[in-house]
Amino acid sequence: MIKAKSFYLQDGLTLAKKLIGKYLVRKLNGHELKGKIVETEAYMGINDKGSHTYGGKRTERTKILYAEGGLVYVYRIYGIYFCLNVVANHKSIPQAVFIRALEPIDEIATMKQNRNKTDLKNLTNGPSKLCQALKIDNTLYGYDLRKGGKLYLENGERIKNISSSPRINIDYAEEDKDNLWRFYETGNPYVSG
DNA sequence: ACATGGATGCTT
DNA sequence: AGCATCCATGTC
């Protein structure tokens, strides 16, 4: 388990790159569902027009982003799905890393059951797919990844080749939409389409 | 290419 | 209290 506070207190961009290759573990009814993080995006806070905290916006939903790195920011999108972020950086610097895709590692059968799908390739290759597969919803809002328990990180694989690109689906972000703040393991088949 | 879906956070 | 928006997905 990755417990060191210093790991989570890094800035969003650094943390987004370092999370590639780490394992995300979800403990559920004694099972340990595990996936390797293969795709992330950095959301850089008050100066990032793509961020939920652009301009220092602080609401009931986004308040957790102002807390210390290592907590979980879950929000509902399009009324249907959930998205998972890891809060980055020090208290009152509202940056986060959006987890976009996993490679399934352990308890794959349980993940298929949670998604009610059997296709391995489409099990966790998208931000809300992985939330379904790991049963991540807003009951985990603000959960501390350093605590261990329901949701935590583990050291996984050292990834040799990491690619970057603009972030997905942030057309509203004006000049910040072109920043190369999406990272993924080059060639990994579980990166989202 | 398009329907889905509802909380969130705007504006009035 | 009304309304446009949204860090997707599945099926068309």
Image (cartoon, coloured by chain):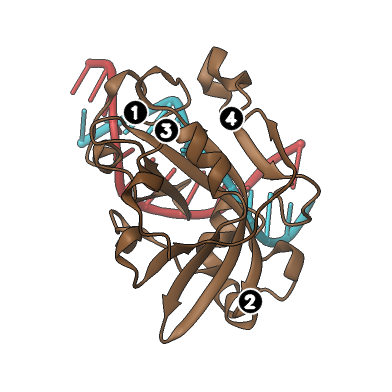
Chain colours: A brown, B red, C cyan
Are the two marked residues, 4 and 3, in contact with CB atoms closer than 8 angstroms? Answer: no
Spatial CA span between label 4 and label 3: 12 Å
Tag 2 subunit? A
Which residue lies under the disc numbered 3?
A: A11
Among the 4 quarters of the image, the one containing residue A141: bottom left
* Element at label 3: loop
Label 3 neighbourhood size at 10 Å, few (<14), some (14-19), many (20+)? many
Q: Whole-percent x and y of residue A11?
A: 42, 33
Q: Whole-percent x and y of residue A100?
A: 58, 48
Label 4 neighbourhood size at 10 Å, few (<14), some (14-19), many (20+)? many
Amino acid at circle 4: Trp
Q: Earlier in the sequence, mark 4 or mark 3?
A: 3
Label 1 neighbourhood size at 10 Å, few (<14), some (14-19), many (20+)? many
Q: Residue at (48%, 26%) from the top-left corner? A: A50
Spatial CA span between label 1 and label 3: 15 Å
Which residue lies under the disc numbered 4?
A: A181
Residue A70 appears in the figure: yes
* Element at label 2: helix
Q: Nearer the viewer, residue A127 or A76?
A: A127
Which residue lies under the disc numbered 1?
A: A53
Amino acid at circle 2: Lys
